Amino acid sequence: MSRNDRKIVWEELSPDDRMKYEIAEELGLLEKVQQEGWKSLSARETGRIGGLMTRRKREMKG
């Protein structure tokens, strides 16, 4: 199965992975991730996703 044929199975993802995909979608990066994989993202794009994940986790706690 090629990377392009892979479908995201939400039930099999951890909560962190779900959040990562959701943020990637919000930033308009989901299609790029699905076609080329996470390694195709620039450091800036990856950092943006990580920063938003951290912010949301803090908001959930407090």
Image (cartoon, grey):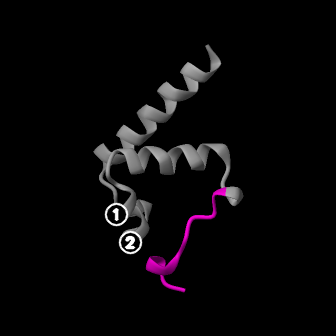
Question: Dot 2, crowdedness within 10 Å: few (<14), some or many (≥20)?
Answer: some
Q: Which mark is residue 32?
A: 1
Q: In this picture, which residue range is highlighted in magenta?
A: 1-10
Question: Dot 1, crowdedness within 10 Å: few (<14), some or many (≥20)?
Answer: some
The residue identified by callout 2 is 35
- Three-letter amino acid code at the position of disc 1: Lys
Q: Could you tell me which quadrant the N terminus lies in?
A: bottom right
- Three-letter amino acid code at the position of disc 2: Gln
Q: Position of residue 37 (x, y in %)?
A: 43, 66
Question: Regarding mark 1 in the picture, which secondary structure is present there?
Answer: helix
Left or right: where does residue 28 sit relative to residue 33?
A: left
Above or below residue 29? Residue 53 is above
Q: Could you tell me which quadrant the C terminus lies in?
A: top right
Magenta segment: does it hold 7? yes
Left or right: where does residue 11 sit relative to residue 38?
A: right
State the residue at coordinates (63%, 57%). Answer: 10
Would you say the residues marked 1 and 2 are in contact, meaning their CB atoms lie under 8 Å apart?
Answer: yes
